[in-house]
Image (tube, rainbow, N blue to C red):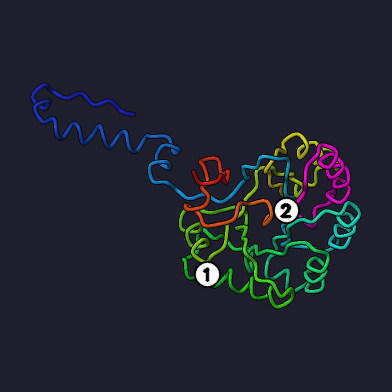
Amino acid sequence: MKLFLFRKRYLAIPGAILAVVTLCLVTTLPSYVTTAATQRQLPIYRVQRDHKVVSLSFDAAWGNEDTETLIQIFDQYDVKVTFFVVGEWVDKYPESVKALHDAGHEVMGHSNDHAHFNALSADEIIADITACNEKIEKITGVSPTLFRPPYGEYDDHVVSTVRGMGLEIIQWDVDSLDWKDYDAATITDRVTSRVGSGSIVLFHNAALHTPEALPGILEYLLQEGYDIVPISQLILPGEYGTDYTIDHTGRQCPAE
């Protein structure tokens, strides 16, 4: 910050100086302070829960070679998870969407064409999500209640628009980074070393080593006493601001 030297005669204008100081403080405050001041709404990254419970989530935007394998693995461990699917993926693989639903997994929206939502208007966001959700509902008979933004990108107008549609916007607090093609041991260590009660874990359906890593991750979670549930069963029910709040870390908490 540049320092300006004022002659004494200018000190007789306290109002102007106060305005300059105030402007400097406002423009240099840490983002978390200004965020708190405006009560910014955040997506749900994790949930405050009293017992060991966790959700596994899979983004499906490209590829389909592993979907049946994933279903078989989850059947083996009697585990249900949440898939966030892109509308264009639904168009290409409707049989996989039906197979996921028939196996008891949640199928939720991940946009229609994986656009950057921060660059879209509210009307464009609504049209995009609606198109994706209608495709899902046509196959599963169930309209999605959750949404994950492409690339994990969002801003205030994205969050408020999605909530205005009656949907909850979901992120994650544990990232497997499986899309980087890490080996199974690295993926397993990333998840098991970071997971906690109320965590939402991010995977991808077409990542190279995810099917290899999953059995070890599932066995660890079950041995540690975690219940593994779809995200709709993890999050707290009700209305934002009335029944629950989301703190500055993205943790969903019961309203006081």
Q: In screen coordinates, is 29 left or right of 96?
A: left
Question: If the image is split into quadrants, where does the N terminus sit?
Answer: top left
* Residue 126 circle label: 1
Q: Which residues are magenta?
A: 204-230
Q: Residues within 10 Å of mark 1 (few under 14, many from 20)?
A: some
Q: Position of residue 49 (x, y in %)?
A: 65, 42
| Kind of residue at disc 2 | Ser
Q: Secondary structure at mark 2?
A: strand
| Kind of residue at disc 1 | Ile
Looking at the image, residue 38 lies above or below residue 120? above
* Residue appearing at x 54%, y 60% in the figure: 117
* Residue appearing at x 76%, y 56% in the figure: 81
The quarter holding residue 14 reads: top left
Q: Secondary structure at mark 1?
A: helix
Looking at the image, residue 180 lies above or below residue 119? above
Residue 219 belongs to the span the image colors magenta: yes
Task: Spot the residue most to the top.
Answer: 8
